[in-house]
Image (cartoon, helix red, strand yellow):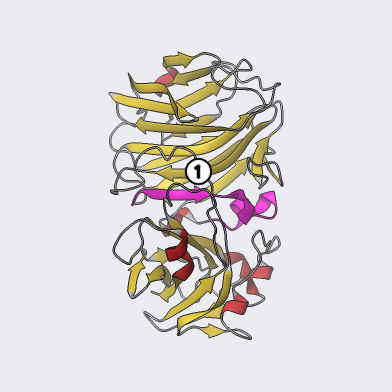
Amino acid sequence: MSVLQAVDWRRYAVSADIEGFEDDATATSTKWSRSGSSTLSAGTGRFGQNSVVCQSGSAQLLKIMLPSGLFTGTTLIVSMDVKFESNATSAVNFGVPIFEVSGATGSHLKIYLDSGGTIQIMGAAGTFLGRAQHVFETGVWHTMEIKVNLADAGSLSMNLDGIAIFTSLSGDFKQDAGALTLLNVWLAGRQNTYYGDMVIMDTAGTVNNDFLTDFRFELQIPDADGATLNWTASAGTRFQTIDDAIGFSSGASGAGYDTDYISDNTLNDINMSSHGAVTASGYTAIQFTALVVVSRADTAGDKVAMLATSSASTTTGPDLGLKVSGAPIAADYRWRRAYFDKDPNGSIAWTPTSINAAEFGVKKR
């Protein structure tokens, strides 16, 4: 695996959805949690999409947990869009980091940003390791990319808008004793710090294992039934039960997810759909495609896998556990996702044409 998590905040309608129905770490996946009043902000992103804003004078935290078995190796890579306004006051030792990586017993890395646009790097045990003065511009979206080797004798590289700010900055970036078993990536800030699209990666794969440079996402929903239709629709055609608008909110209990759906209880049954067209206007390269589904289990141990079919070739993602608490209830729905780094037809880079001709779907596991 290379891509661990790709975040486009348009998928959420309200702030509570970010953590309310996200992946459960017990199912060997990721889980967001929020504290303070970090909020989803519509139309404030770099391209007019949603962003998350921390806009209080105290710490506002958004944390994603990467459990053992998902993150592999010791090198973590994060590419994301960040903007801070003129009254951002984070500073070393008395402020709040805009980015942090922590483990079971403490912080591996903290990145601080002060109101003058200066970046400061702190390693394990709060050790100061480096400073880059006046590199962030106020009120402007920046693409910030971080690659850190989480080791006692580790290193960090950081790019800002494609320009190297730190190159192999050496230091102790491992607070925990023994092996890395759990990573938490924290986004925080003070006084209007905005976070846009984000991709979290490791170095396990042959692609998407380094800085992405400038990037953006396109989102589409199912628009027709595909070639294989083994699952059962609760009403109407299959795709009509899973074509909820981007940013659909299920409500606090998740009851909206139970309105219509596809279901199946036969091992290895598959259901495929086509989707709305992507344009990728002005693109240089397609880094990956992803399928994101919301699902729940009827029986403990139920799993789902996701598929991409291009021409006659199919790639199947990993088996993903589903949440169940006794009798299934609406609140047991959780998002699941799979990333497809390459076009299955030849294991080559995706293009808009190949994406639009492909079908994506689910398999009962």
Name the residue type under label 1: Phe
Q: Residue 245 at what x, y percent from top left?
A: 66, 65
Judge the density around disc 1: few (<14), some (14-19), many (≥20) Cα neighbours within 10 Å. Answer: some
Residue 188 shows up from this direction: no
Residue at the spot x=59%, y=41% of the render?
196
Residue 285 visible from this viewpoint: yes
Tell whether position 261 is magenta.
no
Measured as percent of width and height from the top left, residue 18 is found at 61, 51
Q: Quadrant of the C terminus?
A: bottom left
Horizontal side of residue 137 vs 68, given as left or right? right
Residue tagged by mark 1?
Answer: 215
Q: Is residue 171 above or below residue 72?
A: above
Instruction: Decide if residue 93 is on the left or right side of residue 166.
Output: right
Picture quadrant where residue 171 is located: top left
In the displayed structure, would residue 138 be above or below residue 102? Answer: above
- Residue 117 coordinates in the image, percent (x, y): 59, 18
Q: Residue at x 50, y 25 (%)?
A: 111
- Quadrant position of residue 35: top right
Residue visible at 52% across and 13% down in the picture? 133
Quadrant in the rendering for residue 59: top right
In the displayed structure image, the side of residue 209 where residue 191 appears, left or right: right
Q: At which x and y percent is residue 135?
A: 54, 19
Magenta range: 1-22
Q: Nearer the viewer, residue 255 or 336?
A: 336
100 or 225: nearer the eye? Answer: 225
Residue at screen point 61% across, 43% down? 34
- State the residue lying farthest toward the front: 282
SS for callout 1: loop
215 versus 88 height, above or below:
below
